[in-house]
Image (tube, helix red, strand yellow):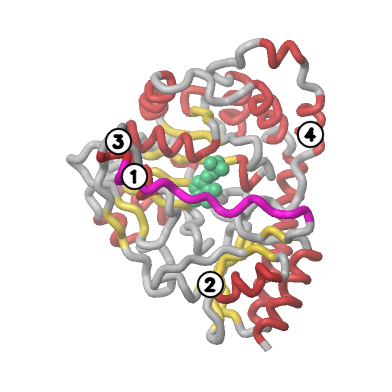
Amino acid sequence: MNRFWPASLQSLTPYVPGEQAVSSNTIKLNTNEHALMASDRALAVLHSISADQLRRYPDPVSRQLSETIARRESLSTEHVLVGNGSDEILGFVWQAYLSDASCVPAVPGLTYTFYPVWAQLFGSELAHIPLKADFCLDVTSMSEWEGPLVFPNPNAPTGLAIDRGQIEAILSANLDRLLVIDEAYMGFGAQSAAPLIKHYDNLIVTRSLSKSHALAGLRVGYALGHPELIEGLRRIKDSFNSYPLDAVAQCVANEALSDHEWESQSEAFIASNRHSLASDLESLGFKVLPSQANFVFATHGKASGVSLTQALRTDGILVRSWDSDALRAWVRITVGTPEQQQRLIENLSRILS
Ligand SMILES: *Cc1c(COP(=O)(O)O)cnc(C)c1O
């Protein structure tokens, strides 16, 4: 605390990112980074960056990358805004569209814990719509909410997704209500809402290369939406930072999004490892929710998520749990390589016996 801090700064509670400082033989299954290395084609572009590319300012509108994204989605570049990770994009969305107190935005009762931080930073209230008893998003209650809605699909930390028909039902229930879908975990089997953008002007979809493309360190995300919604975000971006994406990130991300062969390998690899992780956990007595992300959310009758996390940590394995009443019983485990998962299961089996 400092005497120059205004009350708004004193009361701010920032987001706490997952633990990163680890030794090289730690098995890191706590922050949903990809189990594979990024596309070789993307890494080759990384190595080819020239001094001249770094000497100059990067393209402020990331034209080539935006074109690649637009082409993938059968949209135009006016439907696309790229940014420094999807967290930055979501911050722009909050500032542009969700901080007007006349309509309170709502998020799911259990969801990404950054949303309340933006609500506080940008001075908006925030409502929570409880999940159903089976942890699924409550499509009916969300459809009835009058203010804007923000939710991840698949949801975090459950990994449960709703399909495009359910999203369209929420969208069409109120065409004057903005829907923001955080697709940070797209690319692991769930259905994207992006094809609805051509038909609905009340939809923003955000994406990230952090999880789907094994590029969390590069910090690239983007928004897709109606050109006027995107133009509003661009106004915020250009009033804050003209160059959110550096030259390296623009080139590497562009190549990663062009390597469709890597993408199909990734999807198959994660689906197969997720399946074996879930069934091995079930054999140890865990209940595991059916995930469409690169993590599983699981609970065991004999040990809390917090106690399992502590026990695994002493064995050099990091997983994620939360010290709150709603979540204490649960643990979230990132899908790893078969070798990492085998060590996890061996350790859990010993801890639980
Ligand atoms: C990881 C994550 C993000 C942030 O992604 P970045 O692009 O790395 O900023 C956003 N939303 C959810 C639900 C996430 O899990």
Between the C-alphas of marks 3 and 1, the distance is 15 Å
Quarter of the figure with the N terminus: top left
* Residue at point 75%, 50% (across, down): 36
Q: Callout 3 environment at 10 Å: few (<14), some (14 to 19), or many (20+)?
A: few
Magenta span: predominant SS is loop
Task: Write down the residue under mark 4.
Answer: 43
In percent of width and height, residue 26 lies at 74, 59
In the rendered image, residue 136, in percent from the top left (x then y), is placed at: 43, 66
| Residue under label 2 | 306
Label 4, residues with CA under 10 Å away: few <14, some 14-19, many ≥20: some
| Measured Cα–Cα span from mark 2 to mark 4 | 37 Å
Rounded to the nearest angstrom, the CA distance separating label 3 from label 2 is: 37 Å
Q: Quadrant of residue 128?
A: bottom left
Res 135 → quadrant:
bottom left
Q: Secondary structure at mark 4?
A: helix
Residue at figure coordinates x 24%, y 47% from the top left: 125
